[in-house]
Image (spheres, rainbow, N blue to C red):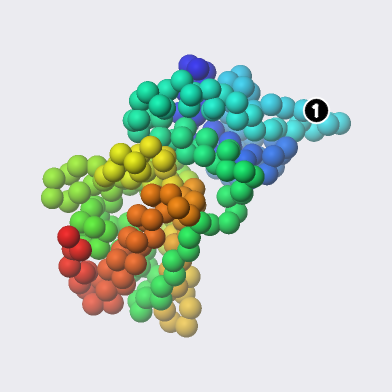
Amino acid sequence: MDEVFKAINDPSRRLLLDVLFESDGQTLGELTSHLPEMTRYGVMNHLRVLEDAKLITTLRQGRSKLHYLNPVPIRLIHDRWINKYAELRVGAIAGLKARVERGGRRMGAPDHIYKAYINGSQADVWDAIVNPDKTAQYFYGTRIDADLEVGGKMNYNYAHNGEVASTGEIIAIDPPNKLEFTFQAMWDEALVAEGPAREVWALVEVNGMVELTIELYEAPSGSKTYDDFTNGFPYIVSGLKSLVETGKGLPAPY
């Protein structure tokens, strides 16, 4: 179990596991393409750690080495620890386990999509998304606390007391076009138990406006995460739109 915890403690290795979940049996070259800032040798080392932890298996096919996801260690950790300790530290494991066991459902299809058109520049909308002084005006009174790079933290903290409302990490970032990150809600024990969701915020200019699309993953319909997020997105996006267009957010809904 120590090897498994060590293996999933790295965001690049978790990404490799997610990539193999999407499409199993990939070569080193194919997997390297998902980590463009890393050398082939660096990806090879990460795969070696995952293989040592039995999280992936490999198969030689001619001159190629194919890599396959092995979910068994994730299941064993869940059975041993998650029922005993409902803590954030194992939330990522719960989320990965849910993806593995979702009956073959692929990550390619979002669980929910929310779209809005904002009368402003793409730079202004992007700033509203990543500026903590601005998120406090529409994101339920929370300030973003993020290291804006792949693998960086992606937290929201309550502005009035600094307590953590959610935690996560950045999966992909392309300013001012796209921000993809995990989102582990911390305001409800039931949400913590369900594990982190994944969000993709995409911006594109259309006819002088900004089309903002938010995609939600790892939150299947019927889950508490799905209900909380889909009910919360309209307020968040409406507040962001108001802030960009008028300079003022919306009154807090509580």
Q: Mark 1: give few (<14), some (14-19) or many (20+) Cα within 10 Å.
A: few
- Foreground pick, 20 / 41: 20
Is 39 left or right of 211, judged from the image as shown?
right
Residue for badge 1: 60
Q: Is residue 216 visible?
A: yes
154 up-or-down from 28: above or below: below
- Foreground pick, 82 / 243: 82
- Which residue appears farthest toward the bottom when viewing the image? 207
User: Which residue is at 54% across, 27% downward?
Assistant: 75
Is the C terminus in the top left, top right, bottom left or bottom right quadrant?
bottom left
User: Which residue is at 19% across, 42% downward?
Assistant: 163
Where residue 243 sits, quadrant-wise, is bottom left
Where's residue 230, x and y in %?
39, 60
Where's residue 157, x and y in %?
23, 47
Where residue 253 sits, quadrant-wise, is bottom left
**Please, what is the three-letter code of the amino acid marked with disc 1?**
Arg
Q: Judging from the image, what secondary structure is the residue with disc 1 in? A: strand
- Which residue appears farthest toward the left when viewing the image? 160
User: Which residue is at 40% across, 35% downward?
Assistant: 91
Where's residue 1, x and y in %?
50, 17
Is 158 left or right of 39, judged from the image as shown?
left
Q: Is residue 153 visible?
A: no
Is 106 left or right of 186, judged from the image as shown?
right
- Foreground pick, 139 / 62: 139
Where's residue 188, x and y in %?
29, 43
User: Which residue is at 48% across, 16% downward?
Assistant: 2
